[in-house]
Each structure stands twice: as structure tokens, then as C-alpha cells.
Amino acid sequence: MDADYFVSLIQGATVWIIPVILAITLHEAAHGWAASRLGDPTARLLGRVTLNPLAHIDLFGTLILPAMLLIMKAPFLFGYAKPVPVNFSRLNNPRRDMALVALAGPASNILLAIIAALLFHAVDLMPSVVDEWFVENLRNLFLLNLVLAVFNMLPIPPLDGGRVLVAVLPDALAWRVARLERAGLVVVILVLFLVPFIAGQLGFTLDIASVLIWGPVDALASVIKAITGH
């Protein structure tokens, strides 16, 4: 294999691998940190309140799935890590704190997107041999974190937005929504990927991701760019 091609291949992989690992690692660590601060030490005792990606990486969800979506040219890229264990009954105020623990993950992604936007101001300080690679990493880190924040806030369990919804609904409704926990993620993926694909095969466009993902992502991106001077 040509050496230049190999180097180009590695560089192309790292501009996605690094943002994916950073985004997912901080997201999961934030859930564990919030749970620990709110009374449940389960994640901390199991070593999950850490920025060491090895503690959070799921082989399929963190590496293989994003790679498959890239190859398939999916409408957006996402992945997941090993779920952080939270014993909601040990939280100081289980109903309220369940929502706060859930919100910690997407909030960490928005924070990372803000940091990425701020770091764009440092591009001119980078050596010319790495400035393009640096820009690609920042661009992907910015976009990926916004997608993860928006995707995870869809109000369907087991996504973070679903957990927030369960926390704020009356008991009778909360119980019904919580029952979607096992099938919720499958339903979301089918709606975002399979249904639009089938529609395309039938000759018409059904771009659900534009409404549920890209619209909110664009709005968030505009706000962050404005507050970070872009």
C-alpha cells in the first residue's frame, strides 16, 4: 500500500474517531458525575465517572456503528457508549434528579460544541502541516456534539429526552411512556433511517431527520456561532 495513501487514510479516520470518542466519553461521564452529585454513587464506584474513553467505549456503538453510517452516507452520524448505571431510587429526589442526570449528557455535548467553536479562533496559531487536520477535527467535533445533543433529547425512552419526559409527566402517563424503554431506540432508528429509505425506494422523499435533527441542530449552531464570535 502506498505510504501517502496510508497516511491519508489514517488522517481521514482520526478526524472522525477523535470527535466521536470525545463526545461520547464526556456524555457518559457527565451522566455518572451528575448521578454521583445527586446521591447515587453507583457509576462512580464502578469507575464510570472518568474521562478515560476505555471505561465507556462500546465496540459496536462507539466504533462500528458510526463507521457503518459513514460508509452508508447516512443523513447524520451518531453512536453510543456503554450505558452508565444509575440507581434512581438512591437519588436525593428521584423524580427531579432523574431529569437532571439525563440532561447532563446533552449539556456536556453542547459544552463541547462551544469549546470547539472557540478553538476555531486558534487555527491561525497551528503549524501549517496540521492546520487542515485541526480544522476538520473541530468541524466534526462541533457538528457531532450538536447532533448527539439533539438526538438524545428526542422525547422517547431510553434517550435522555425520554427520561426527562418520564420525570415531568404525571405518574399514570409516565408509567406508560417508561414502558417504551426497551423498544424506543429501535423505533427511533427505524423512523429516521428505514422509513425514509423505503420512501426513497418508492419514489418520494420523506426526510424526517431534517425536521427532528437538522432543524434544531442548525438553530443551535447559529446561537453558538453568534456567542463565540463567528
Image (cartoon, rainbow, N blue to C red):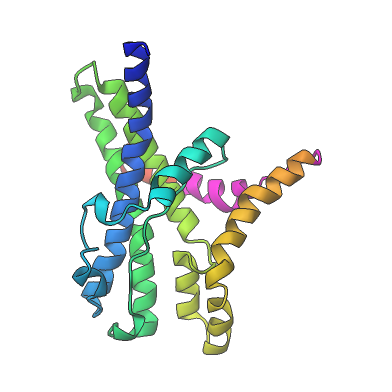
The extreme bottom residue here reads 172
* Count of numbered circles on the image: 0
Viewer-nearest residue: 198 or 105: 198
Residue 223 at x, y = what percent? 41, 47
The extreme front residue here reads 1
Residue 187 at x, y = what percent? 61, 61
Residue 2 at x, y = what percent? 36, 11
The extreme right residue here reads 202
Q: Quadrant of the C terminus?
A: top left
In the image, residue 206 lies in the stretch drawn in magenta? yes
Picture residue at 51% right of the left edge, 39% below the top: 68
Viewer-nearest residue: 17 or 208: 17
Picture residue at 24% right of the left edge, 16% below the top: 129
Left or right, 88 with respect to 37, comes to right
Residue 163 at x, y = what percent? 46, 72
Picture residue at 39% right of the left edge, 36% below the top: 140
Picture residue at 57% right of the left edge, 39% below the top: 74
14 in relation to 114, above or below:
above
Q: Quadrant of the N terminus?
A: top left
Residue stretch in magenta: 202-219
200 in relation to 163, above or below:
above
Left or right, 150 with respect to 99, comes to right
In the image, residue 215 lies in the stretch drawn in magenta? yes
Work out whether residue 167 can be spotted: yes
Left or right, 13 with respect to 178, comes to left
What predominant SS class does the magenta segment belong to? helix
